[in-house]
Image (tube, helix red, strand yellow):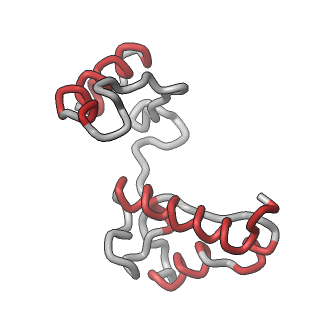
């Protein structure tokens, strides 16, 4: 499916995604008033055809381990400078749902990074 989707236009892909969300009933959730708003921006990474990724994914390089990922994600010097890392490459399995290489873990890591930013930087964001 992903290889096929790479050949669709972004507009067509957005239309298909919105239809899938509608079919799944997301428009019925509280706050949506029976209608999902169109996204303000839509983009799809085309990993298979991107000459710089060639279908890459996160993996442990030689001499690295989950502690290496945690050290990268939780780097205090970066945080002091207002730089917070998130994404599936920052997931080490240390928290339930933060499994390496998963879209949901990428989402959760973003929430964790935002929470860290707000708690450490507060109104200086």
61 or 72, nearer to the observer? 72
Residue at 38% from the left image edge and 21% from the top image edge: 14
Residue at 67% from the left image edge and 66% from the top image edge: 117
Labels in figure, total: 0
39 or 56, nearer to the observer? 39
Q: Quadrant of the C terminus?
A: bottom right
Residue 25's place in the image compared with 59, above or below, is above
| Position of residue 81 in the picture relative to residue 24 (left or right) | right
Residue 9's place in the image compared with 52, above or below, is above
The image position of residue 42, as x and y in percent, is 49, 27
110 or 64, nearer to the observer? 110
Residue at 59% from the left image edge and 62% from the top image edge: 114
Residue at 60% from the left image edge and 81% from the top image edge: 71
The image position of residue 87, as x and y in percent, is 50, 58
| Position of residue 93 in the picture relative to residue 26 (left or right) | right
Residue 91's place in the image compared with 65, above or below, is above
Residue 74, located in which quarter of the rendered image? Answer: bottom right
Residue 12, located in which quarter of the rendered image? Answer: top left
Q: Quadrant of the N terminus?
A: top left
Residue 93, located in which quarter of the rendered image? Answer: bottom left
| Position of residue 72 in the picture relative to residue 122 (left or right) | left
1 or 59, nearer to the observer? 1
The image position of residue 110, as x and y in percent, is 52, 59
The image position of residue 73, as x and y in percent, is 59, 73
């Amino acid at each position: 499916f992903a290889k096929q989707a790479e050949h669709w236009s972004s507009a067509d892909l957005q239309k298909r995604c919105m239809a899938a969300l509608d079919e799944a009933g997301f428009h019925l959730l509280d706050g949506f008033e029976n209608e999902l708003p169109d996204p303000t921006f839509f983009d799809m990474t085309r990993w298979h055809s991107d000459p710089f990724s060639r279908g890459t994914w996160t993996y442990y390089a030689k001499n690295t381990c989950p502690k290496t990922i945690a050290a990268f994600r939780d780097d205090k010097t970066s945080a002091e400078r207002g730089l917070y890392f998130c994404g599936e490459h920052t997931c080490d399995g240390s928290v339930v749902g933060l499994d390496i290489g998963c879209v949901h873990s990428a989402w959760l890591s973003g929430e964790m990074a935002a929470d860290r930013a707000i708690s450490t930087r507060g109104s200086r964001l």
